[in-house]
Image (cartoon, rainbow, N blue to C red):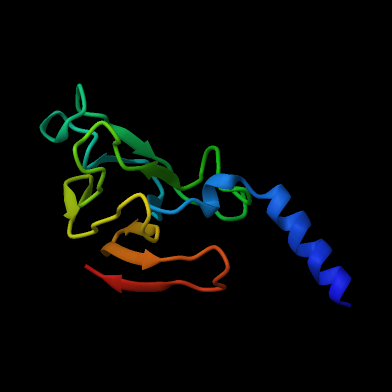
């Protein structure tokens, strides 16, 4: 039984993209039926990027997106390392802004869920079955 669990865990680790296990990232999930345009701290002219990066995030469909990449998947972004302090403090989607994220390269990921009810921030760890969310 122990060998089956170890082999299963190994197979799962090999088949999942490494980025799902990276720390210090913001994951944007869009639950709206149409794409949303987002801006992220560190990726606008005002925060050190050469221009404003308009990030289009499609509807998140877990059935179509089992690996975490591609259309209908969340958008993963790490801090801009060209800044003096690589940190993501805010995310703005379709004019709605959520701040005080304080995601550093060595901190836990923050999952930002955008829906018709506004933003929710969720903390997810790769080995957690669930996630802890709270509305902004």
In this view, the residue in front, 30 or 74, is 74
- Toward the bottom, the furthest residue is 1
Counting from the top left corner in percent of width and height, residue 79 is at: 31, 42
- Toward the top, the furthest residue is 50
Counting from the top left corner in percent of width and height, residue 117 is at: 27, 64
Q: Is residue 135 above or below residue 94?
A: below
Left or right, 109 with reference to 127: left
Counting from the top left corner in percent of width and height, residue 47 is at: 15, 35
Among the 4 quarters of the image, the one containing residue 77: top left
Among the 4 quarters of the image, the one containing residue 49: top left
Counting from the top left corner in percent of width and height, residue 26 is at: 36, 51
Q: Residue at x 62, y 48 (%)?
A: 67
Q: Residue at x 25, y 47 (%)?
A: 87
Q: Residue at x 24, y 34 (%)?
A: 43
> Where the C terminus falls, by quadrant?
bottom left
Left or right, 58 with reference to 53: right
In this view, the residue in front, 85 or 129, is 85
Q: Is residue 34 above or below residue 129?
A: above
Q: Is residue 105 above or below residue 51?
A: below
- Toward the left, the furthest residue is 46
> Where the N terminus falls, by quadrant?
bottom right
Q: Is residue 63 above or below residue 4?
A: above
Q: Residue at x 43, y 42 (%)?
A: 58
Please state the total of marks drawn on the protein image. Answer: 0
Left or right, 108 with reference to 104: right
């Amino acid at each position: 039984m122990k060998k089956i669990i170890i082999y299963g865990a190994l197979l799962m680790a090999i088949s999942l993209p490494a980025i799902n296990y990276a720390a210090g990232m913001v994951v944007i999930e869009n639950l709206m039926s149409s794409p949303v345009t987002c801006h992220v701290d560190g990726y606008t002219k005002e925060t050190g990027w050469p221009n404003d990066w308009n990030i289009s995030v499609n509807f998140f469909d877990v059935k179509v997106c089992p690996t975490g990449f591609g259309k209908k998947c969340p958008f993963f972004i790490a801090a801009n390392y060209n800044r003096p302090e690589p940190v993501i403090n805010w995310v703005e989607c379709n004019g709605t802004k959520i701040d005080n994220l304080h995601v550093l390269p060595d901190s836990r990921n923050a999952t930002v869920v955008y829906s018709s009810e506004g933003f929710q921030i969720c903390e997810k760890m790769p080995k957690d079955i669930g996630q802890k969310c709270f509305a902004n």
